[in-house]
Image (tube, rainbow, N blue to C red):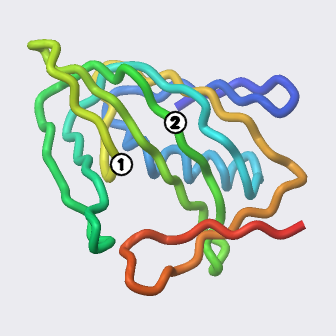
Amino acid sequence: MEHTRSGSDLFVRLDPGDDIHSSLQSLADEVGFDAAAITSGIGRTRDNKYGYMNEKGIYQRRDLENPSELVSLSGNIARTEEGEAFTHIHCCWSDDDNNVHAGHMFQSVVHVVAEIHIRIMAEAIMTRCPLADFELLGLQFKE
């Protein structure tokens, strides 16, 4: 992984074998930010796990194991109540037959490259906290 910074913008290149979630969480620790918007991402990934939350608040998971084109990626980075970096990412992939697969990204490993733009929100405080009756961690803001 390499990155460059211009003001509050980070542009990140992830390399083959890099896990997107853990790489971006490590980047948050390395650079030292607590809140950021992930505004875009493209590339080619494999071992993708994605899904959606059903009406009962439980995630339904799908596997997309074959290498696929990462068409779009967005989300945010916050901290848990324990101070750990937490990534919440949604993605859209296209498989080799141009079938689209999209949803909440649970896992994705870079196959060729991933190029991701992040906007650091230096004055924001965003915290991920458990929500009653949902598998999702909720997002709370402080001034």
Q: Are marks 1 and 2 in contact (CB under 8 Å)?
A: no
Residue farthest front in this picture: 55
Q: Judge by depth and name the residue closer to the eye, 15 or 76.
A: 76
Residue density around tag 1, few if under 14, some if 14–19, many if 20 or more, within 10 Å: many
Q: Residues within 10 Å of mark 2 (few under 14, many from 20)?
A: many
Q: Residue at x 19, y 40 (%)?
A: 47
Residue 128 vertical position relative to residue 36 in the rendered view, above or below: below
Pinpoint residue 141: horizontal percent, then vertical percent.
Answer: 76, 66
Rendered residue at 43%/69% (across/down): 136
Q: Position of residue 48 (x, y in %)?
A: 23, 41
Task: Give the Cα separation between the discs numbered 1 and 2.
Answer: 10 Å
Residue 104 badge? 1
Q: Amino acid at mark 1?
A: His
Q: Residue furthest top?
A: 97
Residue in view at x 26 percent, y 47 percent: 50
Vertical comparison of 11 with 137: above or below: above
Q: Which residue does the image show at 28% across and 67% down from the upper left?
A: 55
Quadrant of the frame with the C terminus? bottom right
Observer-nearest of 47 and 29: 47
Q: Label 1's element? A: strand
Give the labeled residue for mark 2.
74
Closer to the chain start, of discs 1 and 2, is 2
Q: Nearer the viewer, residue 140 or 24?
A: 140
The image shows residue 80 at horizontal and vertical percentages of: 61, 72
**Quadrant hosting residue 90:** top left
Taking the image as shown, residue 141 lies to the left or right of residue 89, namely right
* Residue 69, x across and y down, in percent: 28, 19
Give the tally of numbered discs: 2
Q: Amino acid at mark 2?
A: Ser
- Based on the displayed image, in which of its 4 quarters is residue 70 positioned? top left
Secondary structure state at the residue bearing disc 2: strand
